[in-house]
Image (cartoon, rainbow, N blue to C red):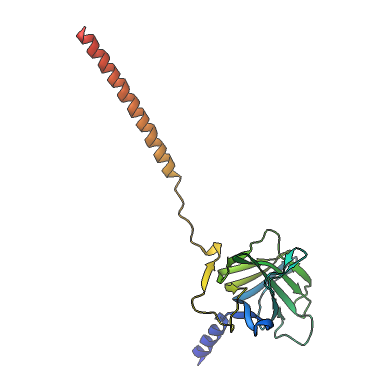
């Protein structure tokens, strides 16, 4: 019985969360989905903690490409959660907002923000923006972004990591289920390293060429010496 309970706990812990946004203008079809094992880490001064993002509720919008003040709204997903447990009947939930934008035949997870408020367990507050120079994630339209670990870096020592992540946007799925045959664009960090040429190889090639030049030069000198010797003998 204990073994069964342990296996059950492990199975639950291994399950990923599925977040999705429906488009009410297209019969509630799903435009964006993110499946992952999400964690949040905050390290500021004497405050340092990491927690799982669970029991979240998701809202959002399914704009395609709507320029507003030079910005593209795109597909926006807002994930509301409460770090102390299930979301209570209060407005001060923590919110992670993900913004997908589409550029021609490609879309990107291009921006993210995090809003936190003080709770009984965590005395933190603020709205954190995406850190400058942080990595964005992209895929071809009709493909999914797939990462073993997809870190979202914020300002001031804040990070959300989407573990075993799979994300898609600008879609038109009938249900929040991954369709068979959907192609994955793997994150660059998960691609196998390209074979590197050893530094020894150029050295060996260089030595070989130098040796070849020396050999040709020596052969030339020997031939020249023999020709002179033959000339003296004929005289």
Q: Position of residue 125 (x, y in %)?
A: 79, 72
Residue 110 sits in quarter: bottom right
Does residue 57 sit above or below 222 in this rendering? below
Q: Is residue 40 left or right of residue 191?
A: right
Q: Residue at x 72, y 85 (%)?
A: 87
Does the image show residue 162? yes
Q: Position of residue 85 (x, y in %)?
A: 70, 84
Task: Quadrant for the C terminus, please.
Answer: top left
Does the image show residue 56? no
Does residue 12 sit above or below 136 in this rendering? below
Residue placed most toward the observer, 155 or 107: 107
Q: Position of residue 160 (x, y in %)?
A: 66, 70
Residue placed most toward the observer, 76 or 40: 76
Residue 131 sits in quarter: bottom right
Q: Residue at x 77, y 88 (%)?
A: 89
Residue 128 sits in quarter: bottom right
Q: Residue furthest left?
A: 234
Q: Residue furthest top?
A: 235
Number of labels in the image equals 0
Q: Residue at x 24, y 11 (%)?
A: 231
Q: Position of residue 66 (x, y in %)?
A: 72, 69
């Amino acid at each position: 019985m204990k073994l069964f309970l342990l296996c059950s706990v492990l199975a639950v812990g291994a399950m990923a969360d599925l977040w999705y946004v429906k488009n009410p203008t297209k019969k509630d079809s799903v435009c964006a989905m993110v499946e992952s094992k999400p964690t949040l880490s905050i390290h500021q001064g004497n405050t340092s903690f990491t927690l799982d993002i669970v029991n979240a509720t998701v809202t959002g919008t399914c704009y395609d490409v709507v320029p507003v003040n030079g910005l593209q709204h795109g597909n926006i997903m807002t994930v509301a959660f409460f770090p102390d447990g299930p979301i209570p009947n209060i407005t001060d939930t923590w919110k992670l907002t993900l913004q997908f934008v589409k550029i021609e035949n490609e879309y990107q997870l291009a921006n993210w923000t995090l809003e936190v408020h003080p709770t009984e367990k965590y005395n933190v507050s603020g709205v954190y923006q995406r850190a400058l120079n942080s990595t964005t994630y992209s895929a071809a339209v009709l493909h999914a972004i797939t990462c073993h670990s997809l870190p979202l870096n914020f300002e001031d020592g804040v990070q959300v990591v989407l573990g075993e992540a799979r994300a898609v946007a600008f879609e038109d799925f009938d249900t929040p289920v991954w369709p068979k045959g959907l192609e994955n664009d793997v994150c660059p960090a998960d691609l196998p390293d390209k074979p590197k040429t050893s530094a020894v190889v150029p050295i060996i090639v260089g030595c070989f060429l130098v040796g070849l030049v020396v050999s040709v030069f020596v052969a030339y000198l020997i031939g020249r010496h023999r020709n002179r010797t033959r000339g003296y003998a004929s005289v």
